[in-house]
Amino acid sequence: MIHHTATSVVTIERFIIEQERQHPQATGQLSGILYDMALAAKMIASKVRSAGLVDILGATDDHNVQGEVQQKLDVFANETIIKAMDHGGRLCAMASEEEPDIIPIPDRFRCGKYCLLFDPLDGSSNIDVNVPVGTIFSIVKKVTKSKHGELADLLQPGRRQVAAGYVLYGSSTMLVYTTGQGAHGFTLDPSIGEFLLSHANIRTPDEGRYLSVNDAYEQHWDDSVRQLMRRYRGLEGGRRSLSVRYVGSLVADFHRNLLGGGVFCYPAHAKSPRGKLRLLYEANPLAFIVEQAGGAAIDGRKRILDIQPEELHQRTPLYIGSKADVDLASRTLAGLKTAVGA
Ligand code: AFP
């Protein structure tokens, strides 16, 4: 663990270098990917900040692979990340929530040993109403011998991630990432255009204050999910009730709960048997971060990071956040009759 004095200003670049120095065998490729992500984040942040000012609001004619209407800013964020990352010689393949297939590294550029998976602009249906949105990313190491990454390189369980992070475009822009040495947060200082260390070694409270769930789906939930929600609300089991907060932008809901303590749930339900969220672009990176901060993430039964993906755009139910609250989900959904607070 690196200690900084209260007065030292630590840029994300300095922090990444200092973390890299703890691994003498490091080639610097992973650090390079993280710098490039920080650069892409600054470019997206600048566009998001001016979204209300320029004629960029509204949907394009395109639909993404999930059949959802793409907002123009989604397209911008997607292209910005691809352009910032494809030429560095560190990646061998990419995958984006907005693209149906693997994004290859163009032949004119060198290929490296890492793969990047990302959701360029999550929560984009919130842009028109000035609600925070985010970018989420995950990095894994190539496992096949091919020069260009293959599907097998991208379809790795989340526990094999070497780094993951998210950017929250909120009242300030924050980037939170982990390389497996704790989760660290940086706030963009727009006056100097740098991400500065603001939240070193984030620890999420063991017990949460907040419950984030869209209970408009209650009619489609099964009985165990309904029971879990009653327990979170203190209506059953004698547990202290959680306060409900739901933005509808995963990064914003996750970030609030990470710092303040809480649980975000997107259960499977009758109309959406695998939930809505994507394993590779949303659940895995956030699960890596929350575990590094002392929290937990499950799909209702299994640890998210142990799920073997079968396809790029696979969806998963998600229960993520403070350990005690996720444990309660695990026990309730398994139908265990143990005491709620136990
Ligand atoms: P959009 O990108 O279409 O706005 O979806 C956002 C999201 O994937 C995630 O950020 C939210 O947590 C979740 O969907 C909200 O979904 P519901 O509207 O079904 O609650």
Image (cartoon, rainbow, N blue to C red):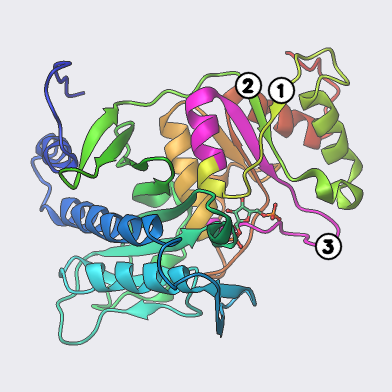
Residue depicted at x 13% and y 39%: 23
Question: Considering only vertical position in the picture, is 221 above or below 37?
Answer: above
Q: Which of 102 and 118 is in front in this view?
A: 118
Residue depicted at x 57% and y 50%: 249
Residue depicted at x 48% and y 54%: 157
234 to the left or right of 288 = right
Task: Specify few, some or many for label 2: CA neighbours under 10 Å numbering under 14, 14-19, or 20 or more.
Answer: many
- Quarter of the rendered image showing ligand 1: bottom right
Q: Residue 62's spot in the image, x, y percent?
A: 55, 84
Q: Which label was assigned to residue 209?
A: 2
132 to the left or right of 220 = left
Question: Considering only vertical position in the picture, is 48 above or below 222?
Answer: below
Residue range corresponding to the magenta coloring: 253-279
Q: Name the residue under label 1.
A: 242
N-terminal label among 2 and 1:
2
Do tag 2 and tag 1 residues touch (Cβ < 8 Å)? yes
